[in-house]
Image: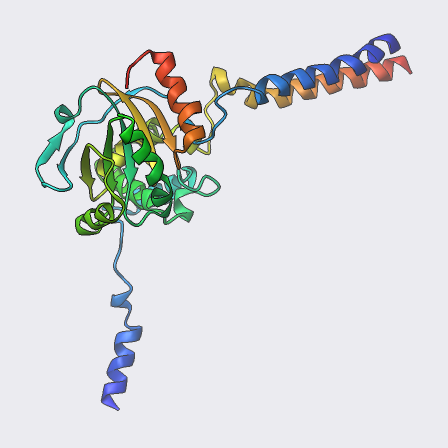
Amino acid sequence: MKQILKILVFIVPICIFAFFYTYLSKDNSYPGADYRVFEIPSFALTELYTETELSNEDLSGNFLINVWASWCITCRVEHGFLEKLSNNGVRIIGLNYKDDRIDAVDWLKKYRDPYELIIHDLNGSLALDMGVTGAPETFLISNGKVIAHYRGEVNQMIWEDVFIETIKDSEIIL
Amino acid sequence: MIKVALYFLFIFSTFLYSETYYEFDDVENEARFYNLIKEIRCPKCTSGSLASSNAPVSEDLKKVISQMIVEGKSDAEIKNYISDRFGKDTLYDTPVEPNTYVLWYSPFIFLTFCLIIFFIRERAK
C-alpha cells in the first residue's frame, strides 16, 4: 500500500501539470475571438450616405464587416489600422451601430473613410442578430457566411493571429 | 404659495415615475421575465446578469426577451435565441454536454479519488 502512495505522489502532480499544460497552451486563446460559422442574418437597412435600401444581396464575396460608431472611443484607436488594411486592398464594410447619421458622416469626414459601403443600423437590430456586444467588433465573411468574429479592437497582432490564421485555414482570398 | 405647492405636486407625483418599460399582460409573465434576466449573463459585461446591466446590448436583449414572452415563447426558446447569438457562456446554468463533462464531473471524480486514498491509508494502519 505504501508503495502505491509513493508512486501516486509522483504521478498525480505530473497528471495535474499535463492537464494544465495542454489546456493553457492552446493557440488562439484570445477571449474576444469566436470561430462559430453562421450565415449573415437577413436584414433590410439603409446605406449611411445615400440612404438607399440594403439587404443581404448587396453583400457578396469575401470581406470584413466592422462594427463602429462615432461615440466609440476604441473605434477611433482602431481606425488607423482599418485604413491600412483598406489601402492594402482588404474590402471592409462598415456596420454603423446605434449612431446618429449626421454624427457618423461627420466622424468619417474628420478621420477619413476606409469603408466600401456602410450599413446604418440605428437600432442595432442586425448587430443583435449577429451577436454584437458593443463596438468595435469585426467579422470575417466568406460568401455570405461569418467565419470569424472578434470582439474588440483589431490591431496588427489580432489581425495576424485571428484573421490571417482563419483566412489561411479556410483557403479564401480576401 | 400655490406655485410652490404645484412644484411639489409635480416633483412627488407618482405618475411621473410610473412609466413601465416592459409591459406584460399578466403577473406570471412579468415574474418569468425578471427571473430570466437574472439567469442570463450580460454579453458585454460577463461578470453580471442582464438584470444588473444597462449596456446597450443588454437593454436590447431585455426588450427582445419581453417581446418573446408576450409572443408566448418558452424559457428554453428564449435561452436558445440568446445562446445562439452570444454563445453558451451567456447562460449561468451551464448545460451538461461532452465539452462540459470535465466541469460537471471532475469534482466527483476528485472526491472518489480522495476517498479511495483515505480508505487505503486507514487499512494500512
Please say which color scheme the image uses.
rainbow
Indicate left or right for A166 with A54 as reference: right
**Where the C terminus of chain B falls, by quadrant?**
top right
Residue occupying the point 45% across, 29% down: A157
Q: How many marks?
A: 0
Query: In the image, residue A113 lies at what x, y percent?
Result: 23, 40
> Relative to residue A145, is residue A1 depicted above or below?
above
Query: In the image, residue B63 lies at what x, y percent?
Result: 27, 44
Residue B121, can we see it? yes
Residue occupying the point 86% across, 8% down: A3
**Where the N terminus of chain B falls, by quadrant?**
bottom left
A57 and B29: which is toward the camera: A57
Residue B28, can we see it? no
Q: Quadrant of residue A131?
A: top left
Query: In the image, residue B42 lies at what x, y percent?
Result: 40, 40
Query: In the image, residue B31 lies at what x, y percent?
Result: 35, 45
> Relative to residue B8, is residue B45 depicted above or below?
above
Residue found at the very far front of the displayed protein: A87
A112 and A103: which is toward the camera: A112
Residue found at the very far right of the displayed protein: B125
Q: Quadrant of residue A81?
A: top left
A167 and B93: which is toward the camera: A167
Indicate left or right for A107 with A153 as reference: left
Indicate left or right for B31 with A113 as reference: right
Indicate left or right for B3 with A8 as reference: left
> Relative to residue A173, is residue B94 depicted above or below?
below
Residue occupying the point 23% across, 25% down: A40
